[in-house]
Image (cartoon, rainbow, N blue to C red):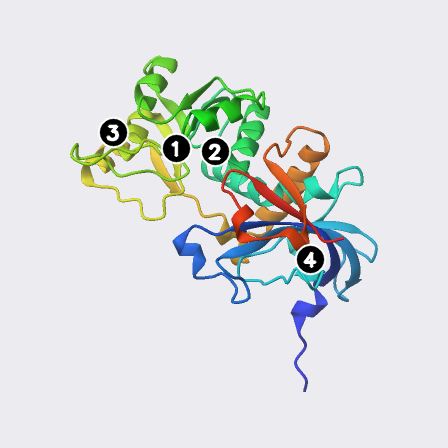
Amino acid sequence: MKEVDNSDLLAVTFTVKTCSVEKVTDPTVKKYVADGYKDDIVVRDVAGVVIQVGSEVTRFKAGDDVVGVLPVNQFFDLNEKTCKLPEFCLVKKPPSLAWEVASSCLMDGIRAYNALHYLGRLKPNETLLLCNAATPFGVLAVQLATGWGVKVFATTSNGEEAQLFRTMSLDVERTLEGHQFMKNSIMDESGGLGIDCIVDNGVFPNFTGTEERDWTKPIKHDILSCLAVSSRWVTQQHDLQIDPPDSELLHIKNASLCHMCPDTLLLSTYRQNYILHILDEVLKKADAGEIRPHLMSVLPANEMKPSILSANKRIVLKLQ
């Protein structure tokens, strides 16, 4: 008896109109990148028009406008211009939402919802410290958090990033340049109470006092010092080392530490409901103008080259 391929029964095939690309930097995720990609540059958000659906697909039909996110282990060739994804990886695109916007905010939306809602458990009137926020993820996270009534503080790597961040007119309480005085500034702003939720974009180990100091990212001890009682620290540092004194500080503050690796949500089939909920919410907010991809560049697909990629900008390619 011939075995039935259930993946085809639930698959949606669509022509891709726009997509976003980025370079995978997390060493733990790089090992899962599909073989067809070069230099760890992968296709992320994809948007297009459905041309064929599997016999068990119920949510889509030919002609529907759809948007989805590719896991890093699924290869998409920009020259092919057609993509096949399971039904649970896709949502319908709002008719009034531009293709370029639709394919620029989904992966960052997954990162933001994962950090702020599922891991950070943020509530209205709480405080958030977003480190190295002058990125597409950081900008979207700020807009999402302020929309929930959260008081947001942000840091940037340097003065140039801080100036760029301030031009976006985001509803941020204060933007700090570098991290040299982050602890003192945050404790002053919070009246010595600390912050309810801190989301980093990587941290440095505690300085020993002998090496040359780099303040482009916060140091571990300053993050721990800024945590309030019963607070949450969401880290993207894959090899973060928590020593006994660090653990004691977390313990006495009744605080928790979460590791954020949103690619796991896409690589695993365990949290498919999370992904669908996030994609739907992000597109609704983008369509309503509640979130806007400030740091976005749109280019023809034939102009794609590794040198244009930047951690501070989302690159969207137009395929047709």
Nearer mark to the viewer, of 3 and 1: 1
* Residue 313: x %, y % from top left: 55, 39
Callout 3: 10 Å neighbours few (<14), some, many (20+)? few
Q: Which of marks 3 and 2 precedes in the sequence?
A: 2
Instruction: Please count the marks in the image.
Output: 4
* Residue 302: x %, y % from top left: 67, 55
Callout 2: 10 Å neighbours few (<14), some, many (20+)? some
* Residue 86: x %, y % from top left: 66, 60
Q: Residue at x 70, y 64 (%)?
A: 80
Q: CA distance from mark 3 to mark 4?
A: 46 Å
Identity, as a three-letter code, of the amino acid under mark 4: Glu
Residue that carries the numbered disc 4 in the rendered image? 87
Callouts 1 and 2 close, C-beta under 8 Å: yes
Identity, as a three-letter code, of the amino acid under mark 3: Ile
Identity, as a three-letter code, of the amino acid under mark 2: Arg
Q: Is residue 3 visible?
A: yes
Q: Which of marks 4 and 1 precedes in the sequence?
A: 4
Q: CA distance from mark 3 to mark 1?
A: 13 Å
Callout 1: 10 Å neighbours few (<14), some, many (20+)? many
Q: Which of marks 2 and 1 precedes in the sequence?
A: 2
Residue that carries the numbered disc 2 in the rendered image? 121
* Residue 118: x %, y % from top left: 50, 39
- Vertical placement of 127 versus 47: above or below? above
Nearer mark to the viewer, of 4 and 2: 4
Badge 3 marks a residue whose secondary structure is helix
Q: CA distance from mark 4 to mark 2?
A: 28 Å
Q: Which mark is residue 232?
A: 1
Q: Is residue 184 left or right of residue 58?
A: left
The quarter of the image holding the N terminus is bottom right
Residue that carries the numbered disc 3 in the rendered image? 252
